[in-house]
């Protein structure tokens, strides 16, 4: 089994477990409120199953030996290179693989730190708009964007769109400061 297939199997197992746990956890919700979380959990579960099946198909194709015919009707087994006795050789650690993991952590850790800081700011009473805007800017910078105007417009547009959809249109309770709630209260009556 290759490393990529092993990682896919681990990810698929995690997705299957998360989807199943989500379905079980949302089963007791009020019928009006459970459709969306159950649909998302089912999508995660089915995606995990799909990844697992695709990984198995990929590993079967990779495990099938390549057979070369030297003459019509004659089949020559594939040659094995490596150890002097013809067996497979033990692969040495690949430094590029270690650099790949370090690069992945260098990218994932800032994203995680920004999202945890955003969640703490929202839960400690800073509201939704300001922490969301700052987190959006920081996430775009970490992702590699360096142009100021698209960063500010993208972060602001995303936060305002989400705020409008959830707070004004869907009337979902969003942790927001009293000044913002008083400012947008008349807008809630439009929908």
Image: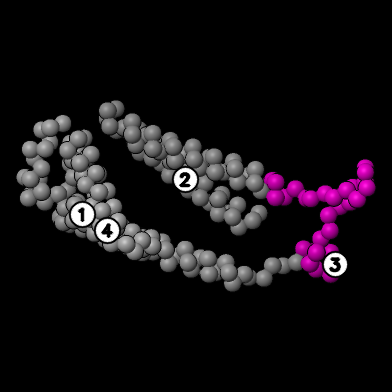
47 or 182, nearer to the observer: 182
Task: Determine contact: label 4, label 3, CB under 8 Å.
Answer: no
Examine the image and state in which quarter residue 132 appears.
Answer: bottom left
Q: List the residue tagged with mark 4.
A: 149
Rendered view: 99 above or below 166:
below
Badge nearest the viewer, 4 or 1: 4
Q: Which residue is mark 3?
A: 85
CA–CA distance in space, label 4 to label 3:
64 Å
- Residue 114 seen by the camera: no
Q: Is residue 77 magenta?
A: yes
Q: CA distance from mark 1 to mark 2?
A: 27 Å
Q: Is residue 153 visible?
A: yes
Q: How is the image coloured?
A: one colour
Quarter of the image with the C terminus in it: top left
Closer to us: 136 or 109: 136
* Horizontal arrangement in the rendering, residue 119 relative to residue 112 (left or right): left
Q: Residue drawn at (53%, 66%), measured in percent from left and top?
A: 100
Q: Residues within 10 Å of mark 4 (few under 14, many from 20)?
A: few
Percent position of residue 86, x then y: 84, 64
Q: Which residues are magenta?
A: 60-88
Secondary structure of the residue carrying numbered label 3? loop
Residue holding disc 2:
15
For residue 32, which quarter of the picture? Answer: top left
- Point out the tag, 1 or 2, that comes first from the N-terminus: 2
190 to 141, vertically: above or below:
above
Q: Disc 1 vs disc 2: which is toward the camera? A: 1
Q: Position of residue 112 (x, y in %)?
A: 35, 60
């Amino acid at each position: 089994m290759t490393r990529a297939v092993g990682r896919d199997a681990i990810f698929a197992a995690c997705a299957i477990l998360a989807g199943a746990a989500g379905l079980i956890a949302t089963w007791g919700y009020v019928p009006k409120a459970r459709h969306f979380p159950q649909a998302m959990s089912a999508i995660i579960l089915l995606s995990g199953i799909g990844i697992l099946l695709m990984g198995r198909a990929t590993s079967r194709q990779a495990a099938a030996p390549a057979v070369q015919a030297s003459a019509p009707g004659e089949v020559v087994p594939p040659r094995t290179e490596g150890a002097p006795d013809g067996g497979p050789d033990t692969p040495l650690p690949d430094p590029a693989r270690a650099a790949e993991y370090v690069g992945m952590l260098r990218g994932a850790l800032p994203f995680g730190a920004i999202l945890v800081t955003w969640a703490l700011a929202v839960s400690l009473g800073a509201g939704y708009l300001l922490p969301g805007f700052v987190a959006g800017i920081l996430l775009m910078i970490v992702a590699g964007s360096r142009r100021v105007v698209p960063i500010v417009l993208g972060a602001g547009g995303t936060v305002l769109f989400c705020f409008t959809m959830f707070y004004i249109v869907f009337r979902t309770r969003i942790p927001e400061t009293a000044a913002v709630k008083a400012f947008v209260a008349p807008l809630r009556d439009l929908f």
